[in-house]
Image (cartoon, rainbow, N blue to C red):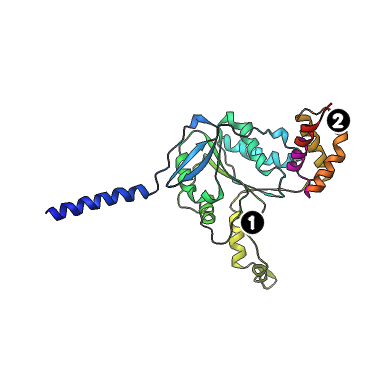
């Protein structure tokens, strides 16, 4: 009997140690602490962490993308009104305002109950746990993933695909996913895959690998594409930010040549490059 008691005591201590190694159940944050949150996993624990000072960019700060703003704002208004709305994929050239547009939605609609949750690509496998925390809340949540792309075989790919459309458990009505990516179909595409496309009786039948990659992006109901700026569009954004940073109108004309040279050296004309130039110019400008 003594041996049995010792064995049971030893087994109980072992179970206690194993419990410490198991992932802890995620806990809900203080929802009043912020309008923006990040999903963070550390060791065996995961939680929604409030962002104390969310990026305060305004829709009006985003120049020359009015059609894109109108589409995503309309979708977000529908969502906030409790109407049908779509998950959104923003793709295209770098630095053209994709992630800034999503952040500006929070600035615009936080007072109407919108909340933004940033989820890193590597943490997308936790999407079912995140969604469970949001179920039944009165707020409306956008799960935001920036610079989304996958390599073959990544587990987060299937997790996102399942949550977007295909899981047995329905996603709550108060949750949408907005993602940005430089890749149209979110995964690398190889020439060999296109070479496997078949032509039967005049019809094109894509290879299974191509179909699989397209199927993820198709689960986003709204696609918004961004393109590099023309020279005039780039200069318009430069002038906007120069004014925002306190450079007087009469000085902005003189900045034109420097702005173009800045873009040439960076190899890009984009909203990000315009903003960076304006910060530099305003920083050393003297009347």
Quadrant, the N terminus: bottom left
- In the figure, is residue 101 to the left or right of 137? right
Residue 200 is left or right of residue 249, and the answer is left
Principal secondary structure, stretch drawn in magenta: helix
Rendered location of residue 187, percent (x, y)? 62, 58
Disc 1: which residue: 185
Locate the C terminus and report the quarter of the image it occupies. Answer: top right
Classify residue 45 as left or right of residue 263: left
Outermost residue to the left? 1
Please tell me whether residue 134 belongs to the stretch shown in magenta: no
Mark closer to the chain start, 1 or 2: 1
Residue at position x 49%, y 47% in the image: 127
Marks 1 and 2, how far apart at CA: 43 Å
Q: Are marks 1 and 2 in contact (CB under 8 Å)?
A: no
- Name the side, left or right, on which 144 lies relative to 279: left
Q: Disc 2 marks which residue?
A: 251
Using the image, tell me which numbered label, if any, was put on residue 260. none
Residue at 59% x, 42% y: name it: 85
Residue 88 in the image, given as x and y percentages of width and height: 62, 46
The foreground one among 286 and 22 is 286
Residue at the image position 45 percent from the left and 40 percent from the top: 133
């Amino acid at each position: 009997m003594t041996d049995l008691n010792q064995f049971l005591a030893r087994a109980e201590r072992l179970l206690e140690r194993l419990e410490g190694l198991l992932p802890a159940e995620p806990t809900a944050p203080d929802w009043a602490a912020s309008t923006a949150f990040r999903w963070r996993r550390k060791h065996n624990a995961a939680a929604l962490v409030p962002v104390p000072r969310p990026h305060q960019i305004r829709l009006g700060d985003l120049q020359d993308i009015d059609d894109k703003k109108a589409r995503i704002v309309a979708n977000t208004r529908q969502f906030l009104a409790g109407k049908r709305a779509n998950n959104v994929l923003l793709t295209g050239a770098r630095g053209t305002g994709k992630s800034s547009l999503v952040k500006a939605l929070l600035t615009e609609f936080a007072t109407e109950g919108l909340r933004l949750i940033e989820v890193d690509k590597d943490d997308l496998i936790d999407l079912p746990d995140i969604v469970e925390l949001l179920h039944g809340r009165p707020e409306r949540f956008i799960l935001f993933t920036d610079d989304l792309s996958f390599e073959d075989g990544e587990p987060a790919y299937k997790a996102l695909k399942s949550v977007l459309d295909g899981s047995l458990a329905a996603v709550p009505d108060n949750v949408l996913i907005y993602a940005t990516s430089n890749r149209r179909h979110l995964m690398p595409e190889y020439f060999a895959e296109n070479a496997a496309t078949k032509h039967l009786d005049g019809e094109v039948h894509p290879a299974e690998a191509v179909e699989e990659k397209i199927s993820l992006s198709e689960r986003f109901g709204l696609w918004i594409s961004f393109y590099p700026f023309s020279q005039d569009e780039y200069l318009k954004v430069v002038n906007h930010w120069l004014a925002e940073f306190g450079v007087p109108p009469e000085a902005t004309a003189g900045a034109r040549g420097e702005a173009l040279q800045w873009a040439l050296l960076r190899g890009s004309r984009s909203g990000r490059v315009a903003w960076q130039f304006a910060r530099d110019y305003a920083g050393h400008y003297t009347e």
